[in-house]
Amino acid sequence: MNAYVKLEIENGIGIIEFYHPQSNSLPGDILNELAETIRVAGLNDEIRVVILKSGGDRAFCAGASFDELLAIENEVQGKQFFSGFAKVINAARKCPKFIIGRVQGKAVGGGVGMASATDYCFATKYASVKLSELAIGIGPFVVGPPIERKIGTSAFCQLTINATNWHSADWAREKGLFAEVFESAEEMDVAIQSLAEKLAASNPDSMRELKQVMWEGTDHWETLLSDRAAMSGKRILSEFTRKTLTKLKQR
C-alpha cells in the first residue's frame, strides 16, 4: 500500500489518518500534506473535533524517514526537511478544534512529538515511546517544545538523554503524554468515539477559546521551531550522524 494522508468527516468528527509502509515513518511530502490537512480541518465548519491517527495495527509513527535523512546534502535541505515537523506541530497548535490522538503502537522521535501536539491522547499498552535522536547524533530540537510542555522538563530529559531506551505506555500516561491507556485498540476506539461524539455536540466557540487558553504562551513557536529545524538540519550533516544512519539502514 502506498503512503497517504486522508481526511474523512462523520457527524461533526474529522478523522485525519496518515500512513507509510515503513512503520508510518514521515518523509517530507507526508509531513507537508499532514500539516495542510490539519489546517484545512481547522477551517471546516462542518468539523467540531479532530481525531489524528495512523494506519495499520502496529507502529503509530517511526518518526523521520532514514532515506530522506541520508539524502540531505546541505543545511538548507536539512532545515527544509525538519521544518516539516515544525509545520505539523504548529498546525495542530493553531487548529481551533480539539485534536484527539490515537496511538495504537510504538512512537519514536517525531511520532512522540506528534502525540504531544494533540490535545487529548489515547493509547494502547503497546504504545511505548522513545526519543532516539541523540543516539544518531542529533537531538529532538523541533519536537522538544511540545513534548516538554506535555510531560515536563524532567521527563523530557529522561527521554532525550536515555535515547536508546523504550518507555512504556504506562510511563507516558503517568507523565501526562497519554490521558488514557487501554488493553486493546478495540477498547481504545470505543473510548475515542465516545469522547469525540461528546465534543462534537459541545459549544464550538467555547472549545475554540479553551484551546487558545491551553496553548497560551506558544505564539513564538513559529520562530522557535524554525530555528530548531535549522539546528537539526546542521547536525544531520555531521560525519557521526551519517555513519550511524548508514549502519542502521543496513540492519
Image (cartoon, rainbow, N blue to C red):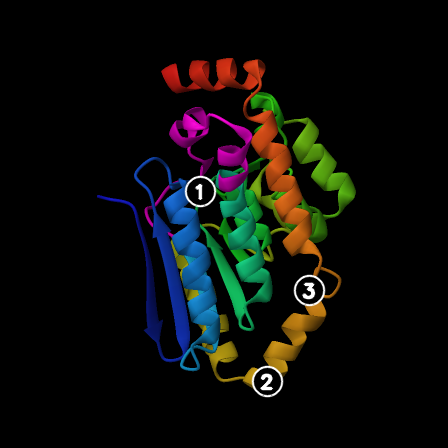
Asked if the residues shown at circle 2 and circle 3 are in contact, with their CB atoms under 8 angstroms apart, the answer is: no
Q: Position of residue 142 (x, y in %)?
A: 61, 42
View extreme (left): residue: 1
Identified at 58% across, 38% down, the residue is 168
Instruction: Give SS at disc 3.
Output: loop
Q: Position of residue 245 (x, y in %)?
A: 47, 20
Q: CA distance from mark 2 to mark 3?
A: 16 Å
Nearest the camera: 150 or 103? 150
- Rate crowding at label 1 as few (under 14), some (14 to 19) or many (20 or more) other CA atoms within 10 Å: many
Circle nearer the N terminus (2, 3):
2
Is residue 187 something that shows in the picture? yes
Q: Amino acid at mark 3?
A: Trp
Asked if the residues shown at circle 1 and circle 3 are in contact, with their CB atoms under 8 angstroms apart, the answer is: no
Q: Is residue 214 magenta?
A: no
- Rate crowding at label 2 as few (under 14), some (14 to 19) or many (20 or more) other CA atoms within 10 Å: few
Q: Position of residue 24 (x, y in %)?
A: 38, 41
Which residue is tagged 3? Answer: 215
Which residue is tagged 1? Answer: 61
- Magenta segment boundaries in residue numbering: 54-80
Nearest the camera: 57 or 227? 227
Which residue is tagged 2? Answer: 205
